[in-house]
Image (spheres, grey):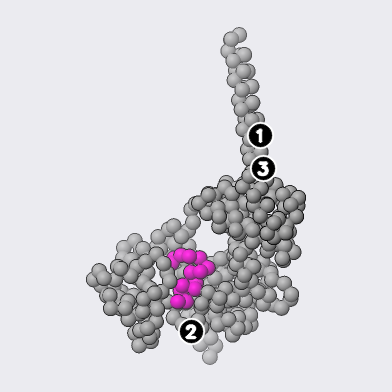
Amino acid sequence: MTVSLPRKIIALTSLLTLLFSAGSTIAANNNFTQRTDVQQFIELMVNQHQFERKSLTQLLSEAKHSEAVIKAITRPYEGKPWYQYRPIFVTEKRIKRGLQFWQENIEALQRAEKKYGVAPEFITAIIGVESFYGVHKGNYRLLDSLTTLGFDYPRRGKFFRSELKHYLLMTREEAIDPRSVKGSYAGAMGKPQFISSSYREYAVDFSGDGKRDLWENTDDAIGSVANYFRRHGWKHGAPVASRASVKGSDYKKLIKKSLKPKKTLTEITSLGVTLDDSPLSDIPGSTRATLIRLKNQSENEYWVTYRNFYAISRYNHSALYSMAIFQIASALREQHNAAIAKLD
């Protein structure tokens, strides 16, 4: 007994020393401004964008590394197959609330359609998927998430350092405290979940109150989504997607990673593709399109998609996301028209 007690004390002392040392290291590493890459970023912001060095250094010293952000970005929904992805987003609850949102904001949605050429159901579907109509706008502090991803996520560090730059510029331009903004783990914010560069480029003051507010001002959110779509090539009344059937094997050469339509509809249908829900006479054969395949548990789905589908994908570069938006919008339009027909 007289020998074992000192050993325990020594072991405990060593453990406490180790923990203290580790804690000190973590605390030191958590101060981003002590790092060379962050100091280089500060230098860039000072020289190119006239930020005050001391205040920017102080701001970034307050940024905290977030392991939760790293974990979230490594398991995106878009990694799921369609049969698992669809039930998450294309739900009766989202469609029902979307019809309510449409009715509550009908004037702004009609103005947006008139000005930008984007139908109300697509604007509604975007806001519904992105934030459930403003309910879920994100709980991550953007200063933390963008700094973490910019400097501790090498796979996309360049992109997120650019977004951190745009975030700092945006908060300066909009007179917002950069410490206060919360959003998604990937730095998206507000009802339409714009990333910082998109906010600066596409957000509009659609309410006419002199400022762009995508957090609380629904009119601004509606106008900004519509502006985003138009700036990415959306055409009013043009087709979005057509369900298709395939035969043979020639169609396989049409399925590419890119959603940008490059083949004509005539070329696509000549390779064993048939449109199920749109007669060829409804859409000119010269229309540019592409073929996508969505994975189901049994038979896969095939869709011919057009320029407007590609415009949706500029919001999120995923065929799954764009198809979910299209199907929600289609359901909203169908149920909206049915409700109007009942009143007549």
Image marks 3 and 2: residues in contact by CB distance under 8 Å: no
For the record, the magenta segment spans: 307-320
Q: Is residue 22 left or right of residue 94?
A: right
Q: Is residue 60 above or below residue 316?
A: above
Q: Sequence order check: which comes first, mark 3 or mark 2?
A: 3
Q: Residues within 10 Å of mark 1 (few under 14, many from 20)?
A: few
- Tag in front: 3 or 2: 3
Extreme residue in the bottom direction: 344
Tell me where residue 220 sits by quadrant.
Answer: bottom right
Q: Which mark is residue 24?
A: 1
Whether residue 221 can be seen here: no
Q: Secondary structure at mark 2?
A: loop
**Amino acid on which disc 1 is placed:** Ser
Residue name at image x 65 percent, y 30 percent: 20
- Identify the mark nearer the N-term, 3 or 1: 1
Report which residue position mark 3 lands on: 34
Residue at 47% from the left image edge and 80% from the top image edge? 334
Magenta span includes 266: no
Q: Are marks 2 and 1 in contact (CB under 8 Å)?
A: no
Q: Which residue is mark 2?
A: 237
Query: CA–CA distance between discs 2 and 1?
Result: 61 Å
Q: Where's the N terminus, which quadrant?
A: top right
- Residue at point 59% right, 76% down? 227
Q: Is residue 157 above or below residue 34?
A: below
Judging depth in this view, the residue of 290 and 67 nearest the camera is 290
**Are there few (<14), some (14-19), or many (20+) residues within 10 Å of tag 2?**
few
Badge number at residue 325:
none
